[in-house]
Amino acid sequence: MFSLLNRPSSGPPRFPEEGTLRPAGARVLAGAAFGVAVVAAVSIAFQFPPLTALLLAGIPVFGAALVWALYWHPRVDISPAGMAFVNILRTTPIPWPAVDDFDLRYGLAVTTRWGTKESAWAMPRAMKRALPTSRQAPPGPSAGARARDNANPLIIVVVDYHAELDKRGFLADPVLEDSTPQRQWNTGVIAALLLTAAWAAAAIISLQVR
């Protein structure tokens, strides 16, 4: 995916490339949900007339769309320019120089130099004890050390990526715009959820009036 995920055992790492981070468990769950939806739709097609089957297929389709929106679509995109927290309903781009600190108590979250706090839905912390915030933590632990205590390898990748850029001097004397991160609504996801929810609702109503 990019060099920090496949860092050689010897020699300096190459400059980080672009990558998309999504938990393996989310991919497995989404794939399983799609498989169940396909099986359910085929089963419905064999049990009902075509028009009725088409209507009832809305139930498994909505289930698959919901799992996709909750687990497959959320991700963290990273590049030398910054990262984007692609959450369920909104996407927030964050330039690397805007990262003031990492808060890893419950997952991947950053405090920006604009004073906002952004969290990544796709990056929950590992199932371990909660970590203190950076303000509560004793002086000394770096973000990288706190990431490793978090034990989520994807969070470690993000923190290492930021540290690599900082080490190479790309984050020195950052020049930032005065505006906060420009969050964008994920209109495609919202539309897909609304349409499939209406489809499933129509299917449920049809079952009740049969």
Image (cartoon, rainbow, N blue to C red):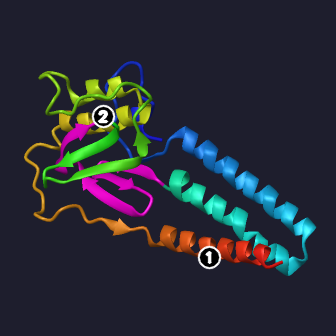
Judged from the image, the secondary structure of the residue bearing numbered disc 2 is: loop
Q: Position of residue 109 (x, y in %)?
A: 29, 44
Question: Does residue 198 appear anywhere in the picture?
Answer: yes
Q: How busy is the neighbourhood of tag 2: few (under 14 within 10 Å), some, or many (20 plus)?
A: many
Q: Position of residue 195 (x, y in %)?
A: 59, 76
Label disc, if present, on residue 105 of the rendered structure: 2
Kind of residue sitting beneath label 2: Arg
Residue at the location (41% across, 19% down)?
Answer: 9
The quarter holding residue 55 reads: bottom right
Q: Which residues are magenta?
A: 74-103
Q: How busy is the neighbourhood of tag 1: few (under 14 within 10 Å), some, or many (20 plus)?
A: some
The quarter holding residue 102 reads: top left
Kind of residue sitting beneath label 1: Ala
* Relative height, residue 127 to residue 38 (above, below): above
Residue at the location (49% across, 45% down)?
Answer: 22
Q: Nearer the viewer, mark 1 or mark 2?
A: 1
The quarter holding residue 105 reads: top left
Q: Position of residue 174 (x, y in %)?
A: 11, 50
Residue at the location (72% across, 72% down)?
Answer: 204
**Pick the front one: 11 or 29:** 29
Per the model, the C-alpha gap separating discs 1 and 2 is: 37 Å
Label disc, if present, on residue 198 of the rendered structure: 1
Q: Position of residue 76 (x, y in %)?
A: 40, 49
